[in-house]
Image (spheres, rainbow, N blue to C red):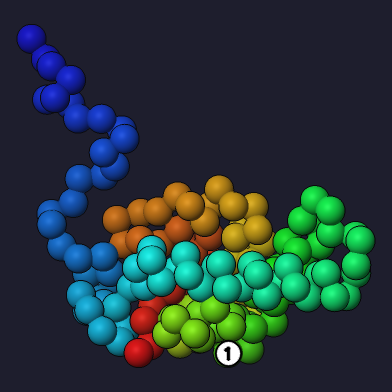
């Protein structure tokens, strides 16, 4: 008889061969060029969120009751900053950069796709084995360490 342990669970995620995140993409396990880990990503997002919240409060006081202005400022910040340099202020602080799979900065077209999906939240929290969110997969980008 087949047991649940034989099949595994969808909660366990995809089975991998034990390699490091980004190995299939030709990225090193650690150091510059490696895939940005969730801890750095979270710190960068928190820094960017609070920066955008402060800007929203300063630019439009009283309009940000539900946080939608903050989300709009986050969208604009991500498109402009990632499109121009490959980093948001949070990414820069944590040593991360959004790059294409070939290792170049993302550019504006990819930044728009990535930012819109990031602001929808769900695509950003669903990861693959290479720790790429669905927003990065859709944009053809990867968040990597640069230092």
Whether residue 19 can be seen here: yes
Would you say 42 lies left or right of 23 here? right
Would you say 69 lies left or right of 49 here? right
Which residue is pictured at 84% across the width and 59% down the height? 64
Image quarter of the C terminus? bottom left
Residue 96 locus on image (x, y percent): 44, 81
- Looking at the rendered structure, the secondary structure element under dot 1 is loop
Tell me the crowding category of disc 1: few under 14, some 14 to 19, or many 20 or more residues within 10 angstroms, Cα based.
some
Residue 79 versus residue 147 in the image, above or below: above
Q: Give the image quarter of residue 131.
A: bottom left
Which residue is pictured at 38% across the width and 63% down the height? 38
Which residue is pictured at 65% across the width and 70% down the height? 50
Q: Which residue corresponds to mark 1?
A: 85
Q: Give the image quarter of residue 139.
A: bottom right
11 or 137: nearer the viewer: 11
Residue 27 locus on image (x, y percent): 26, 77
77 or 117: nearer the viewer: 77
């Amino acid at each position: 008889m087949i047991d649940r342990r034989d099949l595994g669970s969808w909660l366990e995620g995809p089975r991998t061969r034990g390699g490091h995140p980004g190995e299939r993409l030709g990225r090193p396990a650690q150091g510059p060029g490696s895939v940005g880990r969730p801890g750095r990503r979270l710190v960068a997002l928190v820094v960017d969120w609070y920066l955008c919240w402060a800007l929203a409060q300063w630019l439009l006081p009283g309009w940000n009751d539900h946080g939608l202005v903050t989300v709009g400022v986050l969208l604009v910040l991500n498109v402009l900053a990632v499109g121009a340099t490959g980093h948001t202020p949070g990414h820069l602080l944590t040593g991360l950069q959004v790059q294409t799979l070939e290792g170049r900065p993302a550019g504006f077209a990819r930044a728009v796709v990535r930012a819109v999906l990031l602001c929808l939240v769900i695509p950003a929290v669903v990861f693959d084995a290479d720790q790429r969110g669905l927003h990065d997969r859709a944009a053809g980008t990867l968040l990597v360490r640069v230092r």
